């Protein structure tokens, strides 16, 4: 039965592939939780087409003895659920890859370890159960406890009725028992050391990390118009709304979203607007309104390839310039670009504190790759609690836009005190009345812009990875962090380091010093023009010697990053 024999003792990359509607996400959802509970380090990422059914989608699960955080091209175990799956990922297969499936059904010339997925699914009640057969197969190969996963899966499906739950458990058991026999014959053996500390960690994807970070930052209002890949944040906050007393509103368009969020902040709430590039473009006028009224605002911008609809379910880092320059006129803002699921939590939380304290607009830039990445992280340390909201109880002589030395006027909200709280999109005096005075206009604009200095003082420093005595420096931002960090040791170069920016505006004061120390600069970005390199060149008069750019809608893999950096070096 089994002509291919492979043993995995340190790490394994498992890919499940099939058409939309085959239940691949169900396998991912269940298996990653089961593996984490058993002490495995896990990481998962998916790619999918913009269609409800059909096509070919895949999910990669990396399972290892050490913490994992990046996508790899390498496929160790492939479980194809339909005929098209093998061809969809064929370029990622190697001579050492093991395909678990039915050669006759797959119609491939590649070696296959025979697993009668469709026949076992038919025994359970039909083709619809093939995903649970695959789940049982993999659970068995990883040495999970049969009875425990039966209980887990039964509880997962019980909301669909006893009969559905029973059939899914039956399919699971059929796959599990076949996997046990397969392992017993030596076709595939997985013997990866386990780490009991993973059991107590927090398992979440990037969307949930943004959502929970927002909650930790005091978010109590979220509004959005659904748009991939940002919709997961709205869904996560909707699921948490009863437990955390969050108001969730789905608006008719993104113009309504930004204005509703501004209205919530004006009334004293802490609001999040979540969107993607096309929606953020519609928010530009609202951003300028926030700048003039000095109203805090937090926007989550999940990037995807453009222009226009582009590749709506793929990934890119193409919206940096959009976020940096959106809106008419000049006003300060903050741009965070988390590189990991953990940073997505911490920076989303920080976004609310900075927006509130600095009366400014904060954009959290993620992308499809990051929001759809699944992993476990240590429970965040929330310290001694959150700082109190930067609000004042207004007095009768309250001036919303009072000219101050630090550029921060006292922020009140209607009904909290005796004063009149104003918000006007026109230029205004200290009380908020419309003015045309040119001298006062200059003083008001200088006051608003002076907060840029305060924002720099509270900025997040870039992270240096590698040789501190570097001569060549790779520069990256956002979700490229774990990929470049894992690729760096593969290069085996001396005096080489990687500088990652999780805050891309305003730049930390140490940034110029770290960049200018290098004799050679290489940028690695997921866009076609090197937007972040252009920003650094503009700020520090730097020349980048090489550009490693990717903009086909797929993320960098560790292997591709290492190869392309090797070529650049």
Image (cartoon, rainbow, N blue to C red):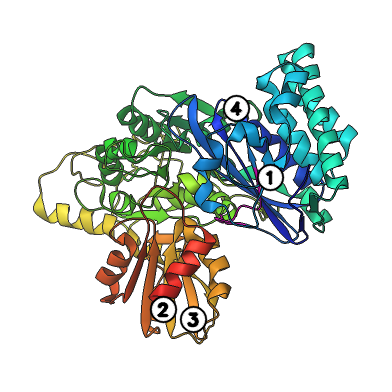
Q: Which residue is painted at 54% across and 50% down in the image?
A: 344
Q: Which mark is residue 22?
A: 4
Q: Quadrant of the N terminus?
A: top right
Please state the extent of the stretch shown in magenta in the rendering: 69-78
Quarter assignment of residue 381: bottom right
Q: Judge depth for marks 1 and 4 and give the one in front.
A: 4
Q: Which residue is painted at 54% across and 49% down in the image?
A: 349
Q: Are marks 3 and 2 in contact (CB under 8 Å)?
A: yes
Mark positioned earlier in the residue sequence (3 or 4): 4
Residue 78 is situated, as x and y percent measured from the top left of the image, at 64, 45
Instruction: Quote the CA–CA distance across marks 2 and 4.
Output: 43 Å
Indicate the secondary structure of the residue bearing disc 2.
Answer: loop
The residue nearer to you, when weighing 453 against 215, is 215
Q: Is residue 547 visible?
A: yes
Q: Which mark is residue 569?
A: 2
Q: Which mark is residue 496?
A: 3
């Amino acid at each position: 039965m089994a002509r291919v024999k492979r043993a995995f003792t340190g790490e394994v990359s498992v890919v499940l592939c099939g058409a939309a509607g085959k239940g691949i996400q169900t396998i991912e959802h269940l298996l990653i939780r089961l593996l984490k509970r058993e002490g495995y380090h896990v990481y998962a990422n998916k790619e999918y087409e913009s269609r409800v059914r059909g096509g070919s989608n895949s999910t990669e699960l990396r399972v290892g003895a050490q913490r994992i955080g990046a996508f790899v091209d390498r496929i160790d175990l492939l479980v194809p659920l339909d005929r098209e799956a093998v061809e969809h990922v064929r370029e990622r297969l190697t001579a050492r890859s093991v395909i678990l499936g039915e050669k006759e059904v797959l119609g491939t010339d590649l070696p296959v370890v025979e697993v009668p997925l469709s026949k076992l699914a038919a025994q359970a009640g039909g083709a619809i159960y093939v995903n649970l057969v695959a789940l049982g197969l993999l659970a068995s190969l990883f040495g999970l406890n049969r009875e425990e996963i039966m209980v887990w899966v039964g509880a997962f499906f019980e909301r669909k009725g006893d009969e559905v739950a029973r059939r899914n458990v039956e399919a699971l058991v059929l796959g599990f028992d076949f996997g046990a026999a397969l392992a017993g014959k030596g076709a595939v053996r997985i013997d990866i050391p386990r780490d009991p500390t993973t059991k107590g960690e927090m398992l979440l994807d990037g969307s949930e990390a943004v959502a929970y970070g927002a909650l930790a930052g005091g978010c109590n209002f979220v509004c959005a118009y659904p748009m991939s890949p940002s919709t997961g944040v709205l869904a996560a906050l909707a699921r948490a709304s009863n437990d955390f007393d969050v108001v969730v509103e789905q608006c008719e368009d993104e113009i309504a979203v930004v204005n509703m969020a501004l209205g919530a902040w004006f009334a004293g709430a802490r609001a999040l607007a979540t969107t993607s590039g096309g929606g953020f473009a519609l928010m530009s006028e609202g951003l300028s309104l926030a700048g003039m009224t000095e109203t805090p605002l937090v926007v989550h911008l999940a990037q995807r390839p453009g222009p226009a609809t582009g590749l709506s379910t793929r990934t890119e880092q193409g919206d940096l310039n959009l976020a940096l320059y959106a809106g008419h006129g000049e006003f300060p803002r903050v741009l965070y670009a988390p590189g990991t699921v953990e940073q997505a939590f911490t920076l989303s939380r920080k976004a609310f504190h900075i927006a509130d304290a600095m009366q400014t607009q904060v954009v959290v830039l993620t992308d499809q790759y990051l929001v759809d990445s699944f992993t476990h992280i240590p429970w965040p340390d929330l310290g001694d609690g959150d700082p109190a909201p930067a609000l004042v109880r207004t007095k009768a002589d309250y001036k919303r836009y009072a000219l101050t030395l630090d550029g921060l006027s006292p922020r009140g909200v209607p009904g909290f005190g005796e004063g009149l709280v104003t918000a006007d999109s026109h230029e205004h005096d200290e009380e908020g009345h419309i003015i045309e005075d040119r001298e006062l206009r200059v003083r008001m604009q200088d006051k608003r812009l002076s907060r840029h200095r305060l924002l720099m003082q509270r900025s997040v420093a870039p992270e240096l990875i590698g040789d501190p005595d570097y001569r060549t420096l790779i520069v990256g931002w956002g979700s490229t962090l774990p990929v470049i960090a894992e690729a760096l040791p593969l290069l085996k170069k001396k005096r080489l380091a990687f500088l990652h920016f999780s805050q891309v505006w305003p730049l930390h004061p140490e940034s110029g010093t770290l960049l200018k120390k290098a004799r050679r600069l290489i940028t690695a970005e997921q866009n076609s023009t090197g937007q972040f390199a252009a920003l650094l060149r503009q700020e520090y008069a730097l020349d980048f010697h090489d550009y490693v750019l990717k903009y086909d809608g797929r993320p960098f893999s560790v292997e591709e990053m290492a190869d392309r950096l090797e070529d650049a070096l």
